[in-house]
Amino acid sequence: MQVFRFSLLVLLLTPIFITNCARNSGSGDKPSLFQSDFQRSKLICGLSECPRSVGRLLMYDAKKDDIFTCTTFVVSGNVMATNDHCIPSGLVAGSDCSQVMGVTFADGQKNWCQNILWRSGDGEATNKMSVDVAYFTIAQPVNRLGLQFNRSGSEDGQVVKIYKVDPPSGEDLIQTLWVDKCRVSLKTRFFPFLDTKDSPAFVLLKQKNQNSSDSDQALCNLIPGNSGSPAVDENGDLRAIVHVRVTINSLTNFAVAVNTACMPDAFNLSSFVSPQHCSLLNNENLDSKVEAEVLEKEIQRAANEDSDKISLELQKNYPMFKWTLTAREIEQGFSKNRLTVPVPQCALKTSHLDKKYEGLIWGYKNASTEEISLPTYTYGVGWDEDLRLTIPLTQNNSFTLHGKMSFEPQKLHDGKPSGVILTYFGGSPVREIPFFADFVNPCP
């Protein structure tokens, strides 16, 4: 099991646990057990109309000395597709897979694997940022229509059906073919830079306005063993292949799927050239680098939006300035806190200055110093029901800056920049500590 953590500016997101396929970790002679399991195992259909092209893949991995199950589907003739991580370790294109892989369909037909045609990797380093696809042939052709590939991409919010084989329960090795209905979500926390319909990967979530009392089919509840499940549209065309299940805190399970645009044509493998944007899925460094950049931009965007709202509030008490938010380290006792605080962005119309200082400083020639109290804020990181990044701003009720503000009203009154110094009283012993000193121009 791989664990992914995302951290930026001391913000730590909840660990993400990714589970690929189901395991049968029984004891004994595993190769013989696999042969026996395959022969006596069954796949039944839990649907009124069962897709004949979808089956269960059972395989034995000698390196891991264990038996696994995944979902597979017919591409055409005797060619099958599944996830790369569902192929036993050590098998490469051209390898004989007849003793370690077998396919069962819901109508009872069983077929041993014949050869591995193509793998996107070696199955060892599969993660949420990989093209996780493999093709293999079975020993006998099947009279089943293969799924048609639709490579036009998927729209945000589009509903797709996931045909999946759930893992066995108990010792009877009976598995069930089900369907889930999920919706496509782009530009999620996992792929914040993938926001177009031809994105190489996207997240599959339950449909909106669904709750635990709804049928399982509406909840997009994907579990281990569903790896390799086809995601099809309303016309029955293949849009993606499911390759990992993700769980965060109390959120319902959801899946990451690879777009068919990144899957090669099984009958033209030698001439396949992966689209350039698909390479993003195999670059783990780009994954964390881009996520960090996106988070930084989102925090800045949130700060810009919040600045307008906070500026209006502060203008009630300090009407001479328009305010903006900035991150500063504030010394408090023997420690420093990194907080988001308001600072002057520009001086507003001179009428505010006239009203504020009328009769107090004749001619506005002298510098003005007045007491000031400023709220402080902290940005958090979360996600909404579409798993898109959210940056909530929270006011720190326990920490308010108390200090003074000095500037020259005369210069601002005349439309000239004035030096503005903001200090706050803190530390031990108590002393004035500047945290903003700059020239402020009149607002346009």
Image (cartoon, rainbow, N blue to C red):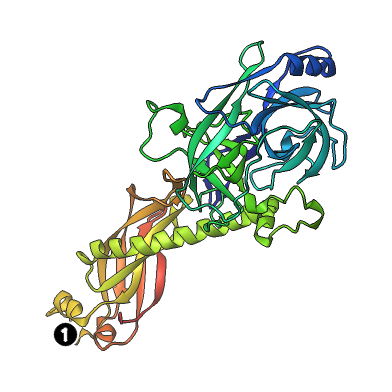
Q: Position of residue 65 (x, y in %)?
A: 81, 23
Quick one: 197 or 398, which is closer to the camera? 197
Q: State whether residue 193 is above or below residue 159.
A: below
Q: In terms of image quadrants, where is residue 384?
A: top left
Q: State whether residue 343 is above or below residue 72.
A: below
Residue hosting label 1: 362
Q: Position of residue 290 (x, y in %)?
A: 60, 57
Tell me what residue is drawn at x 67 percent, y 20 percent: 108
Tell me what residue is drawn at x 35 percent, y 55 percent: 376
Q: In terms of image quadrants, where is residue 113?
A: top right
Q: Position of residue 238 (x, y in %)?
A: 59, 45
Q: Position of residue 422 (x, y in %)?
A: 35, 68
Counting other residues with Cα less than 10 Å from the Cα at mark 1, is it few (<14), some (14-19), or many (20 or more)? few
Residue 125 shows up from this direction: no
**Label 1 amino acid?**
Trp
Tell me what residue is drawn at x 53 percent, y 39 percent: 14
Horizontal side of residue 132 vs 295, given as left or right: right
Tell me what residue is drawn at x 84 percent, y 26 percent: 62
Tell me the quadrant of the picture where the N terminus can be found. top right
Tell me the quadrant of the picture where the C terminus can be found. bottom left
Residue 383 shows up from this direction: yes
Horizontal side of residue 99 vs 262, given as left or right: right
Quick one: 268 or 442, which is closer to the camera? 268
Horizontal side of residue 350 vs 144, given as left or right: left
| SS for dot 1 | helix
Q: In terms of image quadrants, where is residue 41?
A: top right
